[in-house]
Amino acid sequence: MAHPKSKISKQRKRKRRTHKKQTPATIAICKNTGEAHQYHRAYEHEGALYYKGRVVIEAVGAED
């Protein structure tokens, strides 16, 4: 395994890490339900699970 010849200074290490930033997640609005959700994620609306505007899992409940 490779070993560094000298210690990397705090300043040099921090300069390299300045570009690693987390960006906020992009939010999409569903055309069918109007629900805001993250891209490529399933989301729940009125008890049903949606993905790409289509119902994946229907809402299950006792209707009397």
Image: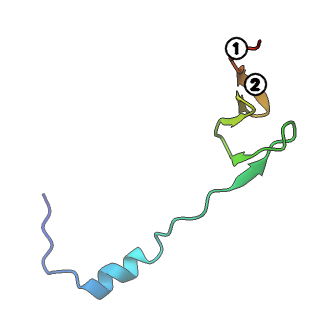
Image-based side of 24 in relation to 54, left or right: left
Q: Residue 51, image x and y in percent?
A: 71, 32
**Disc 1 designates what residue?**
62
* Numbered-mark total: 2
Q: Nearer the viewer, mark 2 or mark 1?
A: 1
Identified at 77% across, 12% down, the residue is 64
Which amino acid does the dot numbered 1 rest on? Answer: Ala
Q: Give the colour scheme of this rendering.
A: rainbow
**Disc 2 designates what residue?**
55
Q: Residue 40, image x and y in percent?
A: 65, 41
Q: In which quarter of the image is residue 9?
A: bottom left
Q: Nearer the viewer, residue 50 or 64?
A: 64
Up the image or down, 47 lies above or below 10; here it is: above
Q: Quadrant of the N terminus?
A: bottom left
Between the residue at mark 2 and the residue at mark 1, the CA separation in whole angstroms equals 19 Å
Up the image or down, 27 lies above or below 63; here it is: below
Which amino acid does the dot numbered 2 rest on? Answer: Val
Mark 2 element type: strand
Q: Which of 4 and 21 is in front in this view?
A: 21
Q: In which quarter of the image is residue 42?
A: top right
Q: Do the residues labelled 2 and 1 touch (CB within 8 Å)?
A: no
